[in-house]
């Protein structure tokens, strides 16, 4: 088509058209990129055009659909954000075409006004670039069409800041096309999370990295089609990346991590899990760079050796939180070197799970090399009482200690550690430690730990009333007590602990303590009713209405009560409802077969404050009773 001999220097310049459709208009009749067509008088059409073909009358309706994609492109890019969103809902063709328009190709009229404000369009562009919207697509919702709609629609609402795609749509799943639409329309994207999506590959990540230069967090989980190629390009083009998560990505290896170490100088958090191609070269490079600012590190189930732990110990000067899980190729030597290197001076939280290299000697070295350590969690590790005692002497500022399935640690070692941390330790958790069992009080030191506020002992089969009495004597300031699954404790053992708690208990969890009765709960209400806020008695089969009456009379601050699978009945709920000072917010009576429809008026009365009510497996409550409660307690979430 010949070009008009007219010069135009305005802002409505035509952009080079790139066809995104295989059957687009022939190039020979496409619009000239340098042409400008001045507005002409609009054609007035009052009736459809009529043709005669082969003796038949044929009606040709005028429609914008007859315009080639090049013309639609030029129209769409001149529309405002809300107008583009409206056009996107006309047809899938228009939506796909709109999603191919990048922000750089959109014409902004500086004299136009934003529909709901007094700002100019230039200010709108600045607002869009900030980005604050969050979108999450899961399962069947995750399609290219939805991503295209998000790309077109969010630009008119402030810009997209965070996108999560979780799960494949087996018939019309998300592909590189949908992610490319996001890249073109959402340059403000800062957080991208892709989980369990096999149809997105390097091309999609390439488009995101090329256009979304503000990206700060990237989360890739179960993405088999993304390889080193895609992640390397992302590292090279996203200098603001601060957090990276890679989980179960079989084609991502050391080369991409080395590129991340070189290019992402602002990286503060990295999590790597179950990636078979990642080894020492990639992991060590993250910490040996002199500009490393890594603060949070999680390494789970990857094939690294002592070399990587040595690199962490030497170069991890900024690490605050470190998690090491399932590192089967790391030996005692690696953990020892990590501590002896004295590089973890800022470390405050350390979690080690299922690592056979954690022994008495390596634990002592870690304690000496991490002087600011506040929290230690060890699960399925092989140190003994000697290692715990040596660690407690070297790590003198510890505040939180969690030991789970550490079967060589006994109550004696725990007690000695409490003596060393008498003024710092605030929380102690012992879970499934089979050697934590009752010992005679005369065999151990009696130094008190006045700083301990929270004590959790769960599912330790050898622990009973004598051990509980000992903790009561050496820990007088307890506020939170969790004794879940301790079948060996009795009323007398728990009473000795209750009488020693000077500060007043706030949270008490006695779930599964089958030998406790109304006697001890009545004492809890008498001694700590003015401070108690949470009480869990689930599975305590000897608990009856007597307990509920004591709670109703004395527990003025109680907000959360669980008496599931207890021997309470309608009378107990009646006592709770008649209490004038009780303001329960959460009540669970699941599995209480003695609660029937007679309790409906009592539950309605309690429901003035309730936000959660659990009536599961209450076989004596009818469907009509549940329906009545749902109508009356419409503000309360009822589980039935």
Image (cartoon, rainbow, N blue to C red):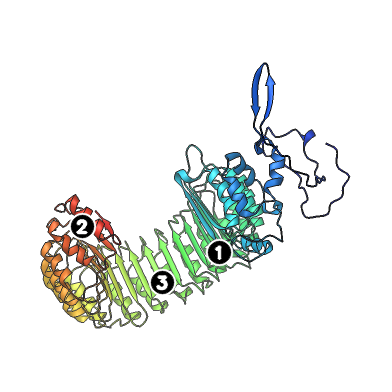
Front-most of 416 and 601? 601
Q: Please, what secondary structure does the residue beneath circle 2 have?
A: loop
Rounded to the nearest angstrom, the CA distance separating label 2 from label 1 is 52 Å
- The residue sitting at 11% across, 72% down in the picture is 519
Residue for badge 3: 375
Across and down, in percent, residue 534 comes to 26, 70
Q: Looking at the image, is 198 positioned above or below residue 535?
A: above
As drawn, is 201 to the left or to the right of 532?
Answer: right
- Numbered label attached to residue 311: 1
Across and down, in percent, residue 516 comes to 14, 67
**Residue 232 in view, yes or no:** no
- Work out whether mark 3 precedes mark 2 in sequence or the reverse, and give the earlier one: 3
- Numbered label attached to residue 590: 2
**Residue 103 in view, yes or no:** yes
Front-most of 616 and 318? 616
- Work out whether mark 1 precedes mark 3 in sequence or the reverse, and give the earlier one: 1
* Image marks 1 and 3: residues in contact by CB distance under 8 Å: no
Q: Please, what secondary structure does the residue beneath circle 3 have?
A: strand
Across and down, in percent, residue 278 comes to 54, 52
Front-most of 170 and 481? 170
Residue furthest to the front in view is 46
């Amino acid at each position: 088509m010949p070009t008009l001999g007219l010069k135009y220097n305005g802002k409505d310049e035509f952009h080079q058209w790139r066809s995104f459709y295989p059957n687009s208009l022939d190039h020979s009749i496409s619009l000239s990129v340098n042409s400008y067509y001045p507005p002409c008088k609009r054609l007035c059409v009052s009736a459809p055009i009529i043709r005669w073909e082969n003796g038949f009358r044929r009606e040709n309706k005028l429609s914008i659909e007859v315009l080639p994609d090049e013309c639609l492109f030029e129209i769409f890019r001149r529309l405002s954000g809300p107008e583009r969103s409206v056009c996107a809902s006309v047809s899938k063709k228009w939506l796909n075409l709109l999603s191919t328009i990048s922000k750089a190709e959109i014409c902004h009229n500086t004299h136009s006004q934003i529909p709901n404000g007094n700002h100019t369009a230039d200010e709108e562009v600045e607002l869009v670039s900030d980005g604050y919207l969050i979108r999450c697509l899961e399962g069947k919702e995750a399609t290219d069409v939805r991503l295209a709609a998000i790309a077109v629609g969010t630009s008119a609402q402030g810009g997209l800041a965070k996108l999560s795609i979780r799960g494949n749509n087996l018939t019309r799943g998300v592909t590189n096309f949908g992610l490319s639409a996001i890249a073109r329309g959402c340059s403000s994207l800062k957080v991208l999370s892709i989980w369990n999506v096999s149809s997105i590959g390097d091309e999609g990540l390439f488009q995101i990295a090329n256009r979304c230069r503000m990206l700060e967090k990237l989360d890739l989980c179960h993405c088999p089609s993304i390889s080193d190629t895609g992640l390397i390009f992302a590292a090279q083009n996203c200098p603001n990346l601060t957090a990276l998560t890679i989980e179960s990505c079989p084609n991502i290896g050391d080369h991409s991590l080395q590129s991340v170490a070189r290019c992402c100088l602002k990286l503060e958090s990295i999590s790597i899990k179950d990636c078979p191609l990642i080894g020492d070269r990639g992991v060590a490079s993250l910490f040996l760079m002199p500009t490393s600012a890594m603060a949070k590190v999680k390494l789970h189930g990857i094939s690294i050796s002592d070399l990587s732990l040595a690199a962490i110990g030497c170069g991890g000067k900024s690490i605050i939180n470190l998690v090491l899980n399932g590192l089967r190729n790391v030996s005692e030597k690696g953990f020892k070197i990590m501590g002896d290197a004295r590089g973890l001076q800022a470390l405050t939280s350390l979690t080690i799970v299922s690592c056979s290299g954690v022994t008495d000697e390596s634990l002592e070295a870690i304690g000496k090399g991490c002087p600011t350590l506040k929290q230690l969690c060890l699960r399925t590790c092989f140190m003994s009482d000697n290692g715990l005692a040596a660690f407690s002497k070297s790590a003198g500022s510890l505040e939180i200690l969690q030991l789970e399935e550490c079967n060589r640690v006994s109550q004696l070692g725990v007690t000695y550690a409490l003596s060393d941390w008498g003024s710092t330790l605030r929380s102690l958790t012992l879970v499934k430690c089979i050697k934590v069992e009752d010992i005679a009080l005369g065999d151990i030191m009696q130094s008190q730990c006045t700083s301990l506020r929270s004590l959790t002992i769960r599912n330790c089969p050898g622990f009973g009333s004598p051990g509980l009495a000992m903790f009561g004597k050496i820990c007088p300031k307890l506020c939170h007590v969790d004794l879940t699954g301790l079948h060996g404790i009795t009323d007398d053992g728990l009473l000795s602990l209750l009488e020693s708690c000077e500060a007043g208990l706030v949270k008490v969890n006695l779930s599964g303590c089958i030998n406790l009765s109304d006697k001890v709960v009545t004492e809890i209400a008498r001694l700590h009713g003015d401070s108690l806020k949470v009480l869990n008695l689930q599975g305590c089969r000897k608990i009856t209405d007597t307990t509920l009456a004591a709670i109703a009379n004395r527990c003025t601050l109680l907000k959360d009560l669980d008496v599931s699978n207890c021997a309470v009945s309608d009378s107990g709920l009646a006592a709770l409802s008649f209490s004038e000072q009780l303001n329960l917010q959460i009540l669970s009576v699941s599995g209480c077969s003695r609660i029937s429809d007679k309790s409906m008026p009592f539950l309605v009365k309690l429901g003035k404050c309730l936000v959660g009510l659990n009536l599961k497996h209450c076989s004596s409550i009818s469907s009509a009773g549940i329906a009545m409660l749902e109508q009356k307690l419409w503000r309360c979430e009822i589980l039935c």
